[in-house]
Amino acid sequence: MLLMRRLLPLLGALAAVQALHARRPAVRFDLPCRIEYGKYVVEVGTPAGPRRFVFDTGASRTTVSGKLCRELGLSAEGQRTVGDYEGYGSRLDMARMPFLQLGEARFDDWPVDVLPDSSYVWCLGVDGIVGSDLLRRFVVRISAADSLVSLADSYRRYEEPDRRKAVRLHRAGGRPFVHLHAGDGGRRMDFYALFDTGSAGFFDCRYHECELLADRGILRDVRRASGRPARMGWTNRSAEREAVWGVLPRLEVAGAVLTDIPTGETYGGTNKIGCGLLRYGTVVIDYPGRRFWLLPHAAAPATPETSVRNIAVAIENGRLVVGQVWDEALAGVVAPGDRIVRAGTVDVSEADPCAFVRGEIRGDKPQLTVERRDGTRVTVAVKNL
């Protein structure tokens, strides 16, 4: 009798846990996605109807446009300081969406950040950014081969993952970080890097760590430049500073060995692995179980292009300018901040910056005409613009 009295609380707790799991739905669903301008774009249900959102594991919190908030009549509920991946921060309004529908998952009364309409992010024709706050209860599978993002309640819903081959997933701000190794022969450096589907690149390291890779002789074909970086965060800000670029002979990610990886610097607070990783295999992120897989493709992909552009184009005060000059032969010919007036024979002096962000500005010849600080003009050949 005494034993039964002791067991009753335990049995009650077990029954409660069993009932809780019984109410938890068995989840696996697919989100069709499109790759546009180097971003994964998915459809998200909102009170204003389905809208296009960027799928961004590098964002800790879901974001919507000011335009969508006004359309829904939402008011701000405070502010917070948010940084972008170039290291700049600003105050953003916060709001609560009545609901967001991501496939079969619904999020009611969900807190979001509101990016101003002036942000160049909205040049991509989207109304929001899906952050890791919507993904943290799921096992997410991302494949470039089938244009699908899948969400499930367990990695066992997928056929491929073997738990023994997973690596430890670390979460910071809800975002997925993994441990990786860069090396060349006997030389090696270890990193923690964010897997960031908001980045179209391969591997971007923090500036001082890129310099360490170069100093230790690991980073090959090293190039340096100064000026404004071509990429910008949501703040639209970029400042003139030093930049480094090179090629990593060997990068180990989740047990896979990648070779000859183009590597540049990022000025934010984290190293990043971008969507370039999906050239090598399917990625599975187990947020609750803190596991990460890279499931290699059967056939090895072609070696990525490793030649750097000779001139980078940036946006300054709404105009196209020379951002960085990577070719030493052009030193003294053009300089960062010089205004770009033609791409080939196409007049771009009054071009919409959004057209450049979307990659719609295409010169009919591989050359730029630049107006220098003294008012003179010069035409230079360009590559990989």
Image (cartoon, rainbow, N blue to C red):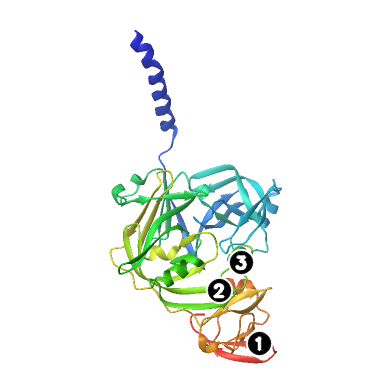
Cα distance, mark 2 to mark 1? 23 Å
In the picture, the disc for residue 242 is: 2
Residue 47 at x, y = what percent? 62, 48
Q: In the shown orientation, is residue 362 left or right of residue 262?
A: right
Residue 255 at x, y = what percent? 31, 58
Cα distance, mark 3 to mark 2? 27 Å
Where 237 sits versus 342, above or below? above
At x 39%, y 20%, the residue is 10
Q: Nearer the viewer, residue 351 or 293?
A: 293
Q: Local crowd at mark 3 within 10 Å, few (<14), some, or many (≥20)?
A: some
* Image-quadrant location for residue 6: top left
Foreground: disc 3 or disc 2: 2
- Quarter placement of the N terminus: top left
Residue 131 at x, y = what percent? 53, 52
Q: Are marks 3 and 2 in contact (CB under 8 Å)?
A: no
Numbered disc total: 3
Residue receiving disc 3: 123
Q: Return the disc, 3 or 2, that comes first in the chain's sequence.
A: 3
Q: Amino acid at mark 2?
A: Glu
Cα distance, mark 3 to mark 1? 26 Å
Tell me if residue 229 can be seen: no
Tell me if residue 65 can be seen: yes
Foreground: disc 3 or disc 1: 1
Where 203 sits versus 95, above or below? below
Residue receiving disc 1: 371
Residue 250 at x, y = what percent? 34, 68
Q: Amino acid at mark 3?
A: Cys
At x 47%, y 74%, the residue is 245
